Each structure stands twice: as structure tokens, then as C-alpha cells.
């Protein structure tokens, strides 16, 4: 007997419509518009003319693209080093019976909710080559510290360190929630069998925490590839080291808003969009090998 399909009326569509309208208006439409603009050339006073693949040819032959891509990859790799650190810290903060655990969580989470501009100003003082705190301590052991934010190489290292530090709070909150889903009976049984805390952390905590770790890796990777505000606030747009330190998003900003080449900037934006999509897809494919969903 053929079953009749149930019709729930138009109410579900009515409830979902505002959300779909927002997604189409603020996400899908800008992507489509940027994709179209990437095939155009803009005049000084506005107006776009169709130029085909000229912007993409210019993009792949521009050495600045590969410098920016390398800087972004290095920054992302350094920030991802914070994930195992966050796993270790989250496990410490969530130790049963730990005093002032809530205070520790707040202190670690504060950098994430603080304004990037305010954080950058504080770190600019710390990294200052003449009177910065960091060079002061380095000088105590007889080493002359570099000009961190105005020297090629050191500038990217300084920004990466701040990025790693500011990402720890968010990662710890997510991982802390994942730790609460691990049954305490597993740790108790392992303890009765004589397993050391390090062995329980390695054999129970980390494997059962891999779904949360995977989520943190995905979010951290995407946010790291969008590096702009921290770089802009710490170094400044007119810093002499910026051409050797800029990220992909700063490369987009410089092309679109300083050089006023909107079509070329749209091509950079599409490149970043596709690159993040490919990396995220690769991570989802690879996660089956190391994420435990049991």
C-alpha cells in the first residue's frame, strides 16, 4: 500500500525563510557578486568593464601572491601549535578539585574577547625594540634584542606569537566542554589498574577528545587564513617590512582599498575563498584517520 506523504503546511517554510533570506543576502549574494567582479576591471571613478581572466593571470604571475601565501601558511602553522598546548591547559584547568578553576578559565578566555586593537597596542609596547619588556629580559642574559615589529622575519614571528596566545582561550573553552563528556568511570578504572596520570591522559583523554580537537583545528585554520586586524594593528600599513610580512587578506586589502584595483582584489578574494574551501575539505577527508567518533 502506497503511503501518502505528510504535508505540514507552509509554517516550516515561514519560520526558515528569514534565516534563508539572511544567508542569501549577506553570504551567497556577496560571493556571487565578488566572483563576477573578479572578471572585471574598475576605473578610477568607478564603473566596471569585462576583462575576462586578466585579473587571474595577473594574480598568478604576481610574486607578492606567493610571499603573502607563505606568510599566511607560516602564521597558521604557528597558531595551530597552540592546539596541543590548549589540550594540555584545558586538562589541567578541568582537573577535579582544582581551586580557582573558574578564575583560570576567565583569565585564559579574556584575550579572545578583548579587542584586537587593544591587544595589539599592548604587544607593540612589549615588542618595542628600544624600551620593550621583552628586549629588557633578553638583555639581562647579554643578548641584544631585535626590532621585532620592524625587522623582516621577526615581525611575522611577533604577530604569530600574539596570534597563538590570543587563540588559546577559545580553544580551551571548546576542549573543556569536550572533557566534560568523557565518562569519569574510565579514568577511575584505569587508575585502579595502575595507569599513571600521563598514561590516562595519553590513552583516554586525548583519543576521546579528538572530535573537539578536530573542531578547534578547523576553526583555527579558517580564522588564521583570515589574518588581517592583528597584522594591521601591530605593524601598520606603512611599515617597511609589510611587503615581506603581509598576509593574503592584507594583500586583498592593499589591492582593493589602497591601490583601488577592485577587480584584482575580487580575484584575490576568490582565491582565498577557494583555498580555504579546499583546505577545509581536505581536513574533513583526513579526519576519518584520527578522529574517534565512538
Image (tube, rainbow, N blue to C red):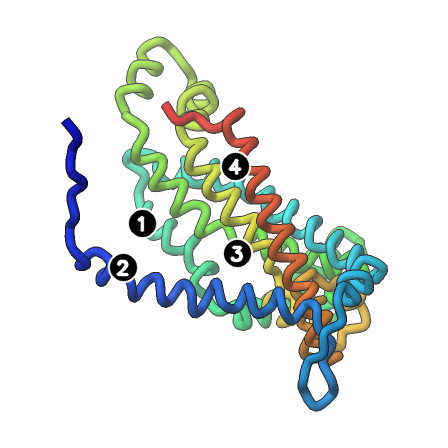
The residues tagged by marks 4 and 2 sit, at their Cα atoms, a distance apart of 27 Å
* First in residue order: circle 4 vs circle 2: 2
How packed mark 2 is, by other alpha carbons closer than 10 Å (few <14, some 14-19, many 20 or more), is few
Q: Position of residue 115 (x, y in %)?
A: 48, 69
Residue density around tag 1, few if under 14, some if 14–19, many if 20 or more, within 10 Å: few
What residue do we see at 28% from left, 25% from top?
184
How far apart are the two marked residues, 4 and 1, measured between alpha carbons? 33 Å
Q: How crowded is mark 4: few (under 14 residues within 10 Å), some or many (20 or more)?
A: some
Is residue 195 positioned above or below 147 on the image? above
Do the residues bearing badges 4 and 1 touch, measured as CB atoms within 8 Å? no
Residue at mark 2: 16
Residue 172 location (% of width, % of height)? 43, 45
Placement of 126 over or under 41, stated as above or below: above
Q: Is mark 3 on a helix, strand or loop?
A: helix
Asked whether disc 4 touches disc 2, contact meaning CB atoms under 8 Å apart, the reply is: no
**Residue where numbered disc 1 is placed:** 102
Q: Mark 4 points at which residue?
A: 284
Which secondary structure, mark 2? helix
Amino acid at each position: 500500500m502506497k503511503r501518502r506523504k505528510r504535508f505540514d503546511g507552509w509554517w516550516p517554510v515561514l519560520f526558515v525563510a528569514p534565516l534563508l533570506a539572511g544567508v542569501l543576502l549577506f553570504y551567497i549574494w556577496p560571493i556571487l557578486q565578488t566572483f563576477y567582479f573578479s572578471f572585471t576591471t574598475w576605473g578610477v571613478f568607478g564603473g566596471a568593464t569585462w576583462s575576462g581572466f586578466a585579473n587571474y593571470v595577473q594574480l598568478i604571475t604576481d610574486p607578492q601572491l606567493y610571499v603573502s601565501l607563505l606568510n599566511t601558511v607560516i602564521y597558521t602553522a604557528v597558531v595551530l601549535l597552540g592546539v596541543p598546548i590548549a589540550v594540555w591547559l584545558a586538562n589541567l584547568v578541568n582537573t577535579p578539585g582544582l581551586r580557582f578553576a573558574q578564575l583560570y578559565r576567565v583569565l585564559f578566555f579574556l584575550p579572545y574577547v578583548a579587542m584586537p586593537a587593544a591587544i595589539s597596542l599592548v604587544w607593540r609596547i612589549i615588542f618595542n625594540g628600544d624600551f620593550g619588556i621583552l628586549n629588557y629580559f633578553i638583555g639581562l642574559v647579554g643578548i641584544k634584542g631585535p626590532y621585532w615589529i620592524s625587522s623582516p622575519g621577526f615581525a611575522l614571528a611577533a604577530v604569530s606569537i600574539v596570534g597563538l596566545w590570543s587563540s588559546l582561550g577559545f580553544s580551551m573553552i571548546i576542549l573543556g566542554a569536550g572533557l566534560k563528556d568523557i565518562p569519569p568511570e574510565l579514568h577511575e578504572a584505569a587508575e585502579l589498574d595502575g595507569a599513571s596520570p600521563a598514561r590516562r591522559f595519553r590513552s583516554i583523554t586525548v583519543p576521546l577528545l579528538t572530535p573537539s580537537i578536530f573542531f578547534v583545528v578547523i576553526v583555527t585554520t579558517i580564522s588564521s587564513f583570515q589574518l588581517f586586524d592583528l597584522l594591521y594593528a601591530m605593524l601598520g600599513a606603512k611599515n617597511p617590512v609589510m611587503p615581506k610580512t603581509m598576509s593574503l587578506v592584507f594583500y586583498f586589502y592593499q589591492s582593493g582599498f589602497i591601490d583601488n584595483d577592485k577587480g584584482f582584489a575580487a580575484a584575490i578574494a576568490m582565491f582565498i575563498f577557494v583555498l580555504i574551501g579546499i583546505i577545509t575539505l581536505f581536513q574533513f577527508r583526513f579526519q576519518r584517520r584520527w578522529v574517534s567518533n565512538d
